[in-house]
Image: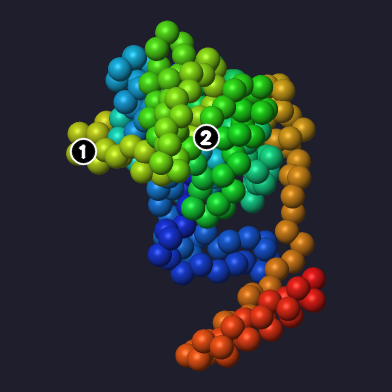
Amino acid sequence: MILVPIKQVPDSWSEKELEPATKRLARAKADPVLNDLDEFAIEAALQVAEASGIPTALVTIGPESAREALLKGLSMGVDEAYHVSDVGLEGACYMQTSAAIAAVAKKIGATLIFAGLESTDGKGAVIPSMVAAHLNWPSASSLSEVSVTNGVIKAKLSESHQEVMYEIPTPCVISLAENSYEPRFPSFKGIMAAKKKTITDFAIADLMNQGFDDLISSPTVSVLDWQEAAPRSKGVIISDIDLAIDSLVTVLREVKESR
């Protein structure tokens, strides 16, 4: 089975603010959407599934509203979904999140994990590699093209005008580069079919005994405090080249001395 971890995130164009009580992003005040970069992983998984017959599944960690992200993925053609929701995972750190995803993968018997490169809210780009480390599986990041032949992932990495070809034995974890695949638009038939597909609910207790109990149960990072960044001051345009150079040297010297 190909498992695709996805995340519901605040729309990039939404106004965002932090909650003083929880010291976390006030997600209920922003428009929730499926993370854009996850759609590339969904499309890659669907194309591999169509060519190989391997079943596909989604997993997300989040509140009740996160089911909307699962429904979108299901309407694109994914076979089934898993929703991990638990008070103990609210504001989960990278370690908790990756361990929970790894536990789901083991529990359902997934042999491939296709992930988006990162989420547009966290921007960590570490979850795929951390999941691979938990499972002790090989991994590769930022791939632009993938296929599966006889239990081996054949993949292409396009970067800096160069192409690198990989062969990765399964089970493995890969992440797809931005714009690597053109995500399909859910059809009306797909949207209606998604409502009948299975979404299985998991709490922390359901993910125990997979080898990651301590990591899932206890956060490794907590936010102690935060403060708003100072507003940017208006810049000064210096048209004289000599004066501009002198000003730049002065600024660089001040920065160096402050360190």
User: Which quadrant holds residue 230?
Assistant: bottom right
Query: Left or right: 256 with respect to 239?
Result: right
Element at badge 1? loop
Query: Left or right: 109 with respect to 230?
Result: left
**Amino acid marked by disc 2:** Ser
What residue lies at 41% left-to-right and 41% top-to-bottom? 161
Location of the N terminus by quadrant is top left
Query: Left or right: 104 with respect to 142?
Result: right
Q: Position of residue 65 (x, y in %)?
A: 46, 49
Location of the C terminus by quadrant is bottom right
Return the disc, 2 or 1, that comes first in the chain's sequence.
2
Camera-side mark, 2 or 1: 2
Most foreground residue, 215 or 258: 258
**Amino acid marked by disc 1:** Ser
Q: Position of residue 84 (x, y in %)?
A: 56, 36
Residue that carries the numbered disc 1 in the rendered image: 187
On screen, 52 above or below 43?
above
Q: How many marks?
A: 2
What residue lies at 74% left-to-right and 54% top-to-bottom? 222
Q: Which mark is residue 250?
A: none
What residue lies at 25% left-to-right and 41% top-to-bottom? 185
On screen, 207 above or below 118?
above
User: CA–CA distance between discs 2 and 1?
Assistant: 30 Å
Query: Left or right: 99 with respect to 115?
Result: right
Q: Position of residue 118 (x, y in %)?
A: 51, 45
Residue that carries the numbered disc 2 in the rendered image: 141
Say few, some or many: other residues with alpha carbon within 10 Å of mark 1 (under 14 / 14 to 19 / 20 or more).
Answer: few
Say few, some or many: other residues with alpha carbon within 10 Å of mark 2 (under 14 / 14 to 19 / 20 or more).
Answer: some
